[in-house]
Image (cartoon, helix red, strand yellow):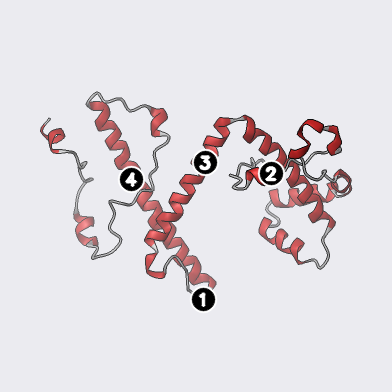
Amino acid sequence: MLGFRFCPRLRDFPDRRLAPIAPVTTYPSIAPLLGKRIRTDIIVEQWDDVLRLVGSIKACHVAPSVMLRKLAAYERQNQLDVALQEIGKIERTLFMLDWLENPDLRRRCHAGLNNSEQRHALTQAIYTFRQGRIIDRSHEAQQYRASGLNLVIAAIVYWNTIYMDAAAQHLRSTSVAVPDDLLAHTSSVGWEHIAFSGDFLWDRAAASAGRKTLNLPPESRVA
């Protein structure tokens, strides 16, 4: 409803069950794969409220996290919350069917997850002094700390992207094939070449003109 595609990697996929709308007995050949039926009566009953909620989120009148906290705060399970869960089961079932039938979808989901995990690993590597934890007490200080961390990550990604492009251009100038479809699978969040500790000479770095040359093998430099 908000225009987003539900594409996670379900780690416990073999243990999950498809949620049918019709009775399970309607599909005897795949009955072992089916779980509980979708409660369509709850969805129909709460549909107007679901649309109002979606409209409020889309118009930025309420944050999704705030709405989830409010729904979770009820002592008894709210009917709107139940309807959203049933709609979620429908979306998850449709996604599971796509996952089974579409190898390209599986590859794209795994690639996206690998990029996210690599980004988290870079965050941990940068923030090793506090073991990846933000210990500031005030909300403002926490925001400053997180913003600074994101700025460092963005600088590393920018640096890597520039030199990866220069490396690709160099290879192409030496008649080495660098297909664009392979470049799409490269990642710019590597940090093995970056020192996170020591003395940083900012004045000297600011005074240097231009970019550093590529670190080429000796035979490449001679050629």
Q: Which part of the image, by quadrant, shows the C terminus?
A: top left
The residue under label 1 is 137
Which numbered disc, 4 or 1, marks the residue that appears first in the sequence? 1
The residue shown at (22%, 26%) is 174
Disc 2 marks a residue whose amino acid type is: Leu
Q: Are marks 2 and 1 in contact (CB under 8 Å)?
A: no
Local SS, label 4: helix
Q: Are marks 2 and 4 in contact (CB under 8 Å)?
A: no
Q: Is residue 6 above or below residue 125?
A: above
Nearest-to-viewer mark from 3 and 2: 3
Residue 80 lies, in percent from the top left, at 82, 54
Disc 4 to disc 3, C-alpha distance = 22 Å
Q: Is residue 193 left or right of residue 18?
A: left
Which numbered disc, 3 or 1, marks the residue that appears first in the sequence? 3
The residue under label 4 is 160
Please tell me how crowded label 4 is: few (under 14), some (14-19), or many (20+) other residues with Cα within 10 Å. some
Q: Is residue 187 left or right of residue 192?
A: right
Disc 3 marks a residue whose amino acid type is: His
Disc 3 to disc 1, C-alpha distance = 36 Å
Which numbered disc, 3 or 2, marks the residue that appears first in the sequence? 2
The residue shown at (73%, 39%) is 33
The residue under label 2 is 2
Local SS, label 1: loop
Among the 4 quarters of the image, the one containing residue 109: top right
Q: Are marks 4 and 3 in contact (CB under 8 Å)?
A: no
Q: Is residue 22 visible?
A: no
The residue shown at (86%, 36%) is 25
Disc 2 to disc 1, C-alpha distance = 35 Å
